[in-house]
Amino acid sequence: MSQWELSVARTAGQRLRPLRSAAIAVSVLLGLSGCGGGELYAPVSGVVTLDGKPLADAKLIFEPIGDDKGTAAGKPSYGRTDEAGRYTLSSPIAGEQGAAVGPHRVRIVTMKAGEYTSEQMEAARAKLLKEEEAGGGSPENVTDERVRAYLSDRLIAPQREMLPDRYNSKTELTITVPPEGTMSADFQLESR
């Protein structure tokens, strides 16, 4: 490179330095703001009890409530209670921890697998006994566990919700997540 080319390159570099600094500043600001629609998320955790006792293995769903046009200020957040009824929310759709700032409808679900009916159990047992006999096996091989395993491969076990509808399908629970700090959202539920 000639002396003249070096001089031109230095001068151009000095002139572009403020533009590069501005571009870096804009990139940093966009990165900090999330630039994905301006949704803010705040940490949310708490404890859920049922009739005064910790409610284990319950799923919490925080659904942002939309405006009058149905536009919500964020994505839903989810959590699951541990043995002590404690939970912490995250929004896997938004890739965020916590919940979107603003009002939410809260659903708490405890769907548990129910039992197969006695008719289903007896029909499955009869089928398995016939297969055992045809194969030269013993009737003692047809245990309740084997009958349930057979049914689980062929039928979806009935589901039952142990909480009243006012906490899930017809929820009456709402909460507003504030923009600053960690929010503790405890729920004291009653089975009646």
Image: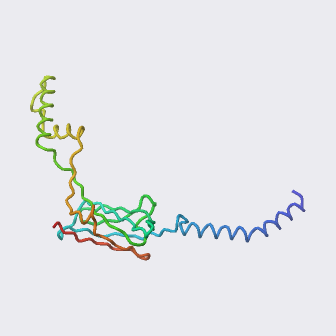
The one of 162 and 84 positioned closer to us in this rendering = 162
Which quadrant of the figure contains the N terminus? bottom right
Q: How was this image coloured?
A: rainbow
Q: Position of residue 190 (x, y in %)?
A: 19, 69
Residue 166 shown left or right of residue 91 in the figure? left
At x 76%, y 67%, the residue is 16
User: Residue 101's image quarter?
Assistant: bottom left
Quadrant the C terminus occupies: bottom left
In the picture provided, is 83 more to the left or to the right than 28? left
The image quarter containing residue 138 is top left
Q: How many marks?
A: 0
Residue occupying image coordinates x 38% and y 72%:
103
Percent position (x, y) of residue 25? 64, 70
> Residue drawn at (23%, 40%), measured in percent from left and top?
155
Q: Position of residue 126 (x, y in %)?
A: 11, 32
Front-lying residue, 71 or 192: 71
Is 5 above or below relative to 182? above
As drawn, 149 above or below 98: above
Rendered position, 87 above or below 158: below
